[in-house]
Image (cartoon, rainbow, N blue to C red):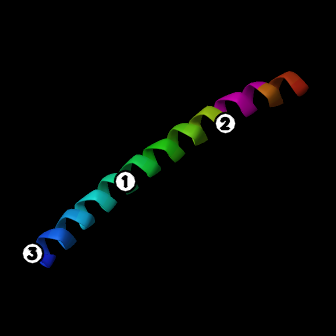
Amino acid sequence: HLEVLKANLHGLSRKNAKKGISKLHKAFLYCTANLGVWLAAKV
């Protein structure tokens, strides 16, 4: 019973980690795009 629970939690944490990395990646791309425009406007 515990092994099933552990496996389930492990699967969930991997799923959440993927979601988190995806969110960070999108935020990073968004920021670099906006900062690039901002820096170009400053010059």
In whole angstroms, how far apart are the C-alphas of marks 3 and 2? 45 Å
In the image, residue 36 lies at what x, y percent?
73, 31
Q: Position of residue 29 (x, y in %)?
A: 57, 36
The residue labelled by disc 3 is 1
Q: Earlier in the sequence, mark 3 or mark 2?
A: 3
Q: Position of residue 22 (x, y in %)?
A: 44, 44
Q: Nearer the viewer, mark 3 or mark 2?
A: 3
Name the spot of residue 41 as percent of width and height, x first.
Answer: 85, 22
Residue 9 figure quarter: bottom left
Q: Can you say whether 11 is above or below 5 in the image?
A: above
Q: Nearer the viewer, mark 1 or mark 3?
A: 3
Magenta stretch?
33-37
Q: Label 1 amino acid?
A: Asn
Instruction: State whether residue 18 appears in this view.
Output: yes
Q: Nearer the viewer, residue 4 or 41?
A: 4
The amino acid sitting under disc 2 is: Cys
> According to the image, label 1 marks what residue?
16
Tell which of 16 and 22 is nearer to you.
16
Disc 1 element: helix
Q: Residue at x 58, y 39 (%)?
A: 27
Quarter of the picture containing the C terminus is top right
Q: Amino acid at mark 3?
A: His
Q: Are marks 1 and 2 in contact (CB under 8 Å)?
A: no
Q: Which quarter shows the N terminus?
A: bottom left
Residue linked to disc 2:
31
Spatial distance from mark 1 to mark 3, Cα to Cα? Answer: 23 Å
Secondary structure beneath dot 3 equals: loop
Q: Are marks 1 and 3 in contact (CB under 8 Å)?
A: no
**Comes first in the chain, label 1 or label 3:** 3
Q: Please state if 9 lies on the left or on the right of 7 as rendered.
A: right
Which of the labelled discs sits on residue 34, or is there none? none
